[in-house]
Image (tube, helix red, strand yellow):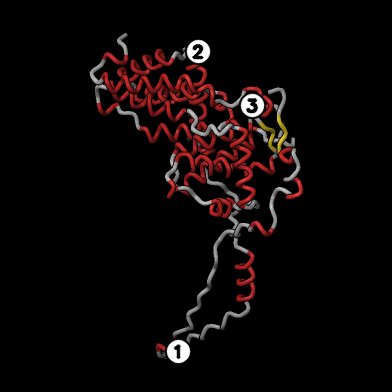
């Protein structure tokens, strides 16, 4: 079996392999703590702590926010990484999870996105319908920053996926066998929504996705390259087979009719209190429309009716201002152990 750098585009391949080696050295540093994940797995739904099911639901919310604000896949993957690392370090009560989810999304956006594409805190709170203030969000971001030591530029499965994808295309012989990166990224986002993949190494998860896609293409050249990438990354056949099976099951579930069918929940139209008061008062002040004559012609003036307009200030309830009250009581903020109000450090760590 030839080495990956012995092909025609050896200069480009060397650069990619060098970057892969750097990421392989760093990936373990940004994994969630295994002991913390074990505690989450043992959490029951009625316990006052975040369970895997609540975690998965919050990641789905993050994916919706990413789509709404037009942020990149890299922002989403980093936000999930920050969320999982924090949850594996701290016990979080479910009622604080919405604020934590918005915080990690905002931190990831500020790390990855250009300044003009970073959503404002007010917009995030308004779209998310959270009963938090901007001050609450800033305090939560500060807690996340301190607990994660400000290490936000994490090595994720998306980095390996991009590098493996580029390395495979350096050596592919037929252009028709190209792997579609957007499709692979979408599959990675689906895996990120499952708690089970919090334990997977980024390099192994990325290679599992790539292996499944190559098997679907039935490409001998690409499969040989995948084997070389596996050997270079020092990924065992046992690990790859184990995670490949879980990835296959996850993607099958996401493409199943049960997952794709529309939600039958009743849609709720949410308006602000001011708009609700306006609609309630204007309901009784609507003038009667002119009666249409049953016979004969009528002039244009008789047929016309007064034009009505209604000024609504938005569909969603506006977020509370800082003066209206904060989520965390002020009297606890000045105490040395005020963070214990919402978090308790897990043991042993």
Q: Is 172 or 83 nearer to us in this picture?
A: 83
Q: Quadrant of the C terminus?
A: top right
Disc sitting over residue 37 in the figure: 3
Image side of residue 107 versus residue 175, left or right: right
Disc sitting over residue 167 in the figure: none
Residue 314 point in image, percent of width and height: 54, 63
Image side of residue 191 versus residue 348, left or right: left
Tag 3's secondary structure? helix
Res 7 → quadrant: top left
Q: Residue at x 49, y 38 (%)?
A: 76
Q: Is residue 64 visible?
A: yes
Task: Classify mark 2: residues with Cα within 10 Å, few (<14), some (14-19) or many (20+).
Answer: few
Q: Which residue is mark 1?
A: 302
Marks 1 and 3, the one that precedes in the sequence? 3
Task: Classify mark 3: residues with Cα within 10 Å, few (<14), some (14-19) or many (20+).
Answer: many
Q: Nearer the viewer, mark 1 or mark 2?
A: 2
How far separated are the C-alphas under marks 1 and 2? 82 Å
Q: Residue at x 68, y 59 (%)?
A: 324
How far separated are the C-alphas under marks 3 and 2? 22 Å
Q: Nearer the viewer, mark 1 or mark 3?
A: 3
Q: Which residue is mark 2?
A: 238
Marks 1 and 2, the one that precedes in the sequence? 2
């Amino acid at each position: 079996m030839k080495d990956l750098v012995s092909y025609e585009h050896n200069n480009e391949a060397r650069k990619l392999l060098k970057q892969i080696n750097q990421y392989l050295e760093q990936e373990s540093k940004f994994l969630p703590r295994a002991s913390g994940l074990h505690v989450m797995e043992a959490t029951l739904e009625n316990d006052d702590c975040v369970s895997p099911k609540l975690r998965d639901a919050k990641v789905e919310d993050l994916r919706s926010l990413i789509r709404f604000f037009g942020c990149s896949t890299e922002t989403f993957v980093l936000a999930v990484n920050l969320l999982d690392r924090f949850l594996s370090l701290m016990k979080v009560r479910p009622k604080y999870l919405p604020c934590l989810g918005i915080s990690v999304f905002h931190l990831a956006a500020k790390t990855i996105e250009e300044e003009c594409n970073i959503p404002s805190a007010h917009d995030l709170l308004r779209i998310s319908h959270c009963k938090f203030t901007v001050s609450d969000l800033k305090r939560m971001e500060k807690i996340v920053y301190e607990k994660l030591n400000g290490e936000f530029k994490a090595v994720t499965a998306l980095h390996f996926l991009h590098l493996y994808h580029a390395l495979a295309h350096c050596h592919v012989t037929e252009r028709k066998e190209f792997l579609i990166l957007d499709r692979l990224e979408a599959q990675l986002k689906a895996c990120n929504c499952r708690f089970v993949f919090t334990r997977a190494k980024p390099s192994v998860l990325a290679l599992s996705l790539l292996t499944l896609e190559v098997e679907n293409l039935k490409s001998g050249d690409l499969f040989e390259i995948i084997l070389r990438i596996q050997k270079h990354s020092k990924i065992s056949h046992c690990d790859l087979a184990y995670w490949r099976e879980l990835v296959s099951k996850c993607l099958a579930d996401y493409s199943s009719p049960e997952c794709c069918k529309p939600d039958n929940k009743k849609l709720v139209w949410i308006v602000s209190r001011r708009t609700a008061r306006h609609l309630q008062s204007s309901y009784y002040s609507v003038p009667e429309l002119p009666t249409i004559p049953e016979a004969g012609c009528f002039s244009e003036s008789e047929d016309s009716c007064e034009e009505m307009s209604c000024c609504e200030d938005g569909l969603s309830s506006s977020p509370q201002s800082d003066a209206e009250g904060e989520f965390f009581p002020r009297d606890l903020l000045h105490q040395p152990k005020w963070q214990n109000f919402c978090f308790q450090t897990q043991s042993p760590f």
